[in-house]
Image (cartoon, rainbow, N blue to C red):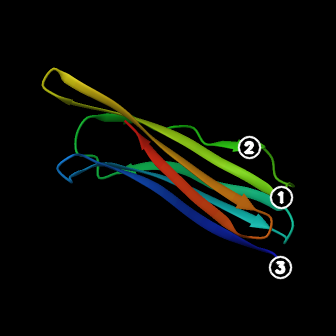
Amino acid sequence: MSGCKNIHGWVTAINWYGATLWKYHQYVSFCYNGSTVTSMFGKYTSVTDLCCGYYSLGNLTFTPPKSGVWKVDSYTVGHFRQCVGPICGDDKGHIHIYLYGSGSYTVSGYVEW
């Protein structure tokens, strides 16, 4: 079976008090024919719910960087910095979206403190 899908993955950073510091999102669209990923498009990253500080959006990396294969890893890392007075903390949001030629996909992500 062939078709196209729009996928959204995200990670959320939550502090010790349960407050959300930021959410890092990855969006990617892909088409498949039942055995290979035929195209990837509409790929971008965004940040929502930023409580404070600043960030830089990571580039999206595809491994392998082409279509016509059975599995593609769409990966990104966002960098965040929050400060309270003179004390600052740096953290990262990692997101993997694995795209398969069958049309299935998996999403995983984590916050690196």
1 or 3: tag closer to the N-terminus: 3
Q: Which of marks 2 and 1 is nearer the N terminus?
A: 2
Q: Which amino acid does label 1 sit on?
A: Trp
Q: How far apart are marks 2 and 1 (CA)?
A: 11 Å
Question: Which x, y percent locates residue 92?
Answer: 42, 37
Horizontally, residue 62 falls left or right of residue 110, namely right
Where is residue 3 drawn, in percent x and y? Answer: 76, 74
| Residue shown at 43% from the left, 52% from the top | 11
Mark 1 closeness class: few <14, some 14–19, many ≥20 residues within 10 Å: some
Q: Rate crowding at label 3 as few (under 14), some (14 to 19) or many (20 or more) other CA atoms within 10 Å.
A: few
Q: What residue type is labelled 2?
A: Thr
| Closer to us: 93 or 61 | 93
Q: Which residue is drawn at 70% across and 44% down?
A: 62
- Mark nearer the viewer, 1 or 3: 1
Q: Mark 3 points at which residue?
A: 1
Decide: is 91 above or below 102. above
Q: Residue 10 location, x and y as percent?
A: 46, 55
- Residue at 22% x, 40% y: name it: 52
**Residue at mark 1 to residue at mark 3: CA–CA distance:** 14 Å
Res. 84 image quadrant = top left
* Helix, strand or loop at mark 2: strand
What's the amino acid at mark 3?
A: Met
Work out whether mark 2 precedes mark 3 in sequence or the reverse, and give the earlier one.
3
Residue of label 2: 63
Residue at the left extreme?
Answer: 85
Q: Name the residue under label 1.
A: 70
The residue at the point 61 percent across, 55 percent down is 97
Circle 3 — which element?
loop
